[in-house]
Image (cartoon, helix red, strand yellow):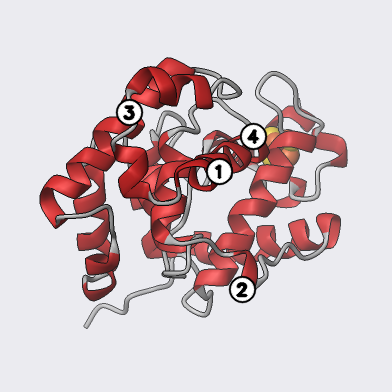
Amino acid sequence: MQLLLDDPRTDQLRRVHAGLIGCFGRIIRPPDKRRTPEWTLVQGVIGAQTKTAISNASTDALLARFGTWDAVADVPVEELEAMLAAQSFPRVAAERLSACLKAIRKQRGSVTLAHLSNLPTPEAMAWLEILPGVARKNSAGVMNASTFNRKAMVIDGHHRRTMQRIGIVAEKADTAKTYDTLMPILPEEWSAADMDEHHLLLKKLGQRFCKPRSMDCPNCPVLADCRTGSARLNR
Ligand code: SF4
């Protein structure tokens, strides 16, 4: 009988996680900072190429001004565009948001994601990814970073790039492929909050050491586990 061996990348992920905590400290999202699934969805839909803090502020401003997501769904795109002026692509964000909220209301009668709480995570994510403007990063965000607090790894550009350079996912893997590679090899003891923290730590790694156009490998906290860093320093 053939024994199933653990994937060595699982331990590699544990070591990377520990190294990142050693460098950056713990990054734990307090329970009272988790937002509703609908808020998290909107923040993702309008957030392309925009800093998280700006998208957070825009999402809060929409809700403060109009009161409910159903009311936001009725706002003309031009008005939404003006409200989203701080986003990198206000027109695209407004069009996507309007289409997304209307699509939810058409299917559910109002802008609510409450029905997803009864679905397994993969099915809930598949339902979200049919909506206009929603891709894997956003669907995983709704599952993991909102009050749903489910096991799903959020993958942004920093996360994808660092995982590729470290050598845990294939070099040209897109977000969905990166997600599909990582989810089966994550340490089984990791909670949804651990996954959230892991993602936030990798973001910091990508911002501080492993930037898109420059890498500070000699000082990087995960050098010992990084294929690219080892190759660069052993040239
Ligand atoms: S060792 Fe270099 S390539 Fe690897 S994660 Fe760190 S900065 Fe990026």
Instruction: Name the residue type under label 2.
Output: Pro
In the displayed structure, 87 sits above or below 230; it is: above
Whether tag 1 and tag 4 are in contact, CB under 8 A, the answer is no
C-alpha span from label 1 to label 4: 26 Å
> On the picture, is 43 further left or further right than 173?
right
Does label 1 or label 4 sit earlier along the sequence? Answer: 4
Tell me the residue that label 2 is attached to: 31
In the displayed structure, 169 sits above or below 34; it is: above
Q: Which mark is residue 163?
A: 1
Where residue 178 sits: x, y (%)? 41, 44
C-alpha span from label 2 to label 3: 29 Å
* Front position in the image: 23 or 36: 36
Q: Based on the displayed image, in which of its 4 quarters is residue 75 positioned?
A: top left
> On the picture, is 84 further left or further right than 125?
right
> On the picture, is 67 further left or further right than 206?
left
Q: Residues within 10 Å of mark 1 (few under 14, many from 20)?
A: many
C-alpha span from label 4 to label 2: 21 Å
Under 8 Å from ligand 1: the CB of mark 4? no
Tell me the residue that label 3 is attached to: 96
C-alpha span from label 3 to label 4: 17 Å
Tell me if I can see residue 209 in this picture.
no
